[in-house]
Amino acid sequence: MEKEQRPRVLLVDDEPNILKTMTICLEEINMKVTACKQPQQALELILKQPFDLAFIDLKMQPIDGLTLLEEIRKYAPSTTVVIITAHGSVESAVEAMKKGAYHYLQKPFDYLELQIFAKKVLEYHQLQQEVERYREQLSYWAETNDIVTRNKDMLEKIQLARQIAPSDLSVLIEGESGTGKELFAELIYQSSDRVNKPFVKINCAALPENLLESELFGHVKGAFTGAIKDRKGRFELADGGTVFLDEIGSLSPSLQAKLLRVLQQKEFERLGESVTRKVDVRIIAATNTDLEQAMEEGTFRRDLFYRLNTVRIKLLPLRERPEDILLLAQYFAEKFSDSKDVKIAPDAVKALKAYHWRGNVRELENVIKRAVILAKNNIIELTDLPEEVRFALQNPQRLLSLEEMEKQHIRKVLQTASDLNEAAKILGIDPATLWRKRKRYNL
């Protein structure tokens, strides 16, 4: 099995000594080498079996390296080709690169130099293959209402959202800014029985308390300075539909009490009047703050929390979904490009994967949108990325916070321990503390 995983390399050169030396050299670094000194034989080989890399001599008879390159590009486009050239033929090698070769190797070359060079070519090839796999997967992943992910935990959250959508249960969506809370709210709404009724969104942190109360519940003429006529609030406008309350943790205590009444009794009064109005709405709330901590601090009502928390969906930050970074990057690249053939160069891929993404998916989206504008020939290069993303290549080993280290260590212990009691014993904490930490870290 291990042998099958070795990278396959095709060597084509009409000099037997070059072939022998290169074969020994590349096999030493665990590459599976097929060598041939006749270019016409190489044509037969590429039709019979796949190769990861191909090293082709430029000057051969009766078929030269450029012709062989064109055939490989035609029949085996996933093979990464390197042109071997003698000193003084660099111009021809550059021409080969324009026709699809990755790079050129100049004779004579040093043994160790060849091994280092081959490893770099293989890394490039593997990154290219990874990009292509993600591009092929996009047609499937993009079907989840623009929630593009292949992370197991996130896919389970999507399934949960779809399962509870037809009910009238309140939903609390938690996650850092930019993780896709609004997309999940829209998914629930689109999959619900209220899909033909209004879907009303409001950011609770965007308005001061007096304006937010009027925005939510409406007001009557004369209720405050500037209230020149009666006005319906968002709840009234959403009657029969769904209200999405983003940044629910920023609500004042008085508005929390009024929201609790809507949840419990489905009634409210407009600002400035005493007439009780009935309303039928489903509430989806979102927060990027720790509401449990807010309850402990007395800034968020427990009864409101438990009303909202009928179904709780906690979204992972992008740094905990590394398998999604390239998938999302390619998705956004195609979204913002006029051409669906846009590609991300391997060096840019490495930088995107090394960066921390504190702003999560939203930050990645903005970075790719900028890169698409700067990119030439539909290829996003490293130079098209912001400085902070490029800098991640120089500092790939990010220092972890104590909280992140604790989370990773607890996850590792839980994976190896036979049960929770054993895990608590290994960690040196009581089971109740472990339960709280698992809940906090969503483990």
Image (cartoon, grey):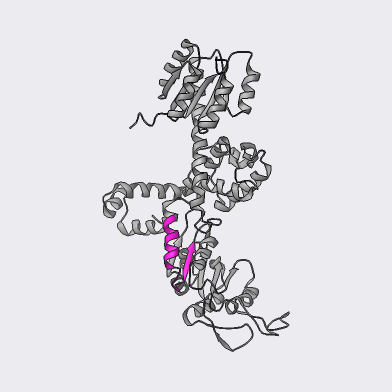
Is 327 located above or below residue 280 in the figure?
above
Quadrant in the rendering for residue 202: bottom right
Quadrant in the rendering for residue 103: top right
Left or right? Give the position of 371 relative to 418.
Answer: right
Which is nearer the eye, 401 or 416?
416
Q: Does the magenta stretch include residue 163?
A: yes
Which is nearer the eye, 44 or 202?
44
Where the N terminus falls, by quadrant? top left
Is 394 located above or below residue 110 in the figure?
below
Query: Residue at 49% across / 39% down in the picture?
Result: 130
Query: Residue at 65% across / 45% down in the picture?
Result: 372
Give the percent coordinates (x, y) of residue 82.
Answer: 54, 24
Give the percent coordinates (x, y) of residue 106.
Answer: 57, 17
Which is nearer the eye, 434 or 121?
121
Give the percent coordinates (x, y) of residue 32.
Answer: 40, 24
Does any portion of residue 28 appear in the rendered image? no
Query: Residue at 64% across / 70% down in the picture?
Result: 208
Which is nearer the eye, 58 or 258?
58
Is 255 located above or below residue 370 in the figure?
below
Q: Does the magenta stretch include residue 55?
A: no
Left or right? Give the position of 416 relative to 266.
Answer: left
Highlighted range, magenta: 155-174
Query: Residue at 46% across / 71% down in the picture?
Result: 170
Give the percent coordinates (x, y) of residue 219.
Answer: 65, 82
Quadrant in the rendering for residue 23: top left
Where the C terminus falls, by quadrant? bottom left
Does any portion of residue 137 appear in the rendered image? yes
